[in-house]
């Protein structure tokens, strides 16, 4: 049951990665400012003795698949297999095949819960938030700027609950004739998401906002796609997957608050930002001098 004063539901879908520091940033900058309820959607193979499961209002777990292709074989009969084969080297086959399933499971089993709320935040477990998340705008789908990779970023979105069914219908889209007929030369998760939004008309509702989060990973954590290589210093075992995503997020926050105020608010993140920027500058200088 939703609380009378709660308009937002945050859904974390996928694999519970990123660790407690990442999730604490989510509580601080997303869950609490929006006064949101929390839903988790993941397989049953994960340890549930973590703060997320203590805080969650909904725990949508399912039996882990030994092969995620089995989900498609049991639920779809069309073009999904040919579609995924077009992205074997782009992450579509290895990563998209997995995380598309979460959207379909939520759509088929929990749509009634989503529609009890006014707004839905659909995101991943591994998003580290460096500043307060923006509030909803009626009729708009808020997606952070950047990380588009020839399509549109599919890691995070805030949207009116009335869009839930269309937003979550990516498996039905890739199983359709129209998806197979309009495959891009370079096909990945982001191009697929963009084509889905274009096909169902939701693209006209998309509004980009200044990025205030980056994708994190604990050292040695399993991933279906990119392995994190950049250490987040002074944060035990925490890594940055995409350094440009981190730099952009901190820069946006500094521009919003000014450097001094943001440093007082987030000194460790600011120090890592200075370090990465200096490292890049020295790298460019070295190349110039060679």
Image (cartoon, rainbow, N blue to C red):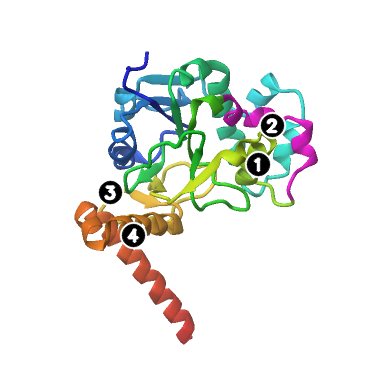
For label 4, the residue is: 255
- In this picture, is 25 found above or below 146? above
Which mark is first along the chain, 3 or 1?
Answer: 1
Q: Is residue 67 visible?
A: no
Query: For numbered disc 2, what is the local secondary structure?
Result: helix
Q: Who is closer to the viewer here, 180 or 21?
A: 180
Q: Residues within 10 Å of mark 2 (few under 14, many from 20)?
A: many
> Image quarter for residue 275?
bottom left
Q: Is residue 256 visible?
A: yes
Query: For numbered disc 3, what is the local secondary structure?
Result: loop
Q: Residues within 10 Å of mark 1 (few under 14, many from 20)?
A: many
Left or right: 213 in relation to 233: right
Q: Mark 2 against mark 4, which lies toward the viewer?
A: 4
Residue at 38% x, 38% y is: 135
Q: Position of residue 235 (x, y in %)?
A: 27, 50
Which mark is first along the chain, 3 or 4?
Answer: 3
Range covered by the magenta-colored residues: 165-184
Q: Position of residue 147 (x, y in %)?
A: 52, 52
Which mark is first along the chain, 2 or 1?
Answer: 2
């Amino acid at each position: 049951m939703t609380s009378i004063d709660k308009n937002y539901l945050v859904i974390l879908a996928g694999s519970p990665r990123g660790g407690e520091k990442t999730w604490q940033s989510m509580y601080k900058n997303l869950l609490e400012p929006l006064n949101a309820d929390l839903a988790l959607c993941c397989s049953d193979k994960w340890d549930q003795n973590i703060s997320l499961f203590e805080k969650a209002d909904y725990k949508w777990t399912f039996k882990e698949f030994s092969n995620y292709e089995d989900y498609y074989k049991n639920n779809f009969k069309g073009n999904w297999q040919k579609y995924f084969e077009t992205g074997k080297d782009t992450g579509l086959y290895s990563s998209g095949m997995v995380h598309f399933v979460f959207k379909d499971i939520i759509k088929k089993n929990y749509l009634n819960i989503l529609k009890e709320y006014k707004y839905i935040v659909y995101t991943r477990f591994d998003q580290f938030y460096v500043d307060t998340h923006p509030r909803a705008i009626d009729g708009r789908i808020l997606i952070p700027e950047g990380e588009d990779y020839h399509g549109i970023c599919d890691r995070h979105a805030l949207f009116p609950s009335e869009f839930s069914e269309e937003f979550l219908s990516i498996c039905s889209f890739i199983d359709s004739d129209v998806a197979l007929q309009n495959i891009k030369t370079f096909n990945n998760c982001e191009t697929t998401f963009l084509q889905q939004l274009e096909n169902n008309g939701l693209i006209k509702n998309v509004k980009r906002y200044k990025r205030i989060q980056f994708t994190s990973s604990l050292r040695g954590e399993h991933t279906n796609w990119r392995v994190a290589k950049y250490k987040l210093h002074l944060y035990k075992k925490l890594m940055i997957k995409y350094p440009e995503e981190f730099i952009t997020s901190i820069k946006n926050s500094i521009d919003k608050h000014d450097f001094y105020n943001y440093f007082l608010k987030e000194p460790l993140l600011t120090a890592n930002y200075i370090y990465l920027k200096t490292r890049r500058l020295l790298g460019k200088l070295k190349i110039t001098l060679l």
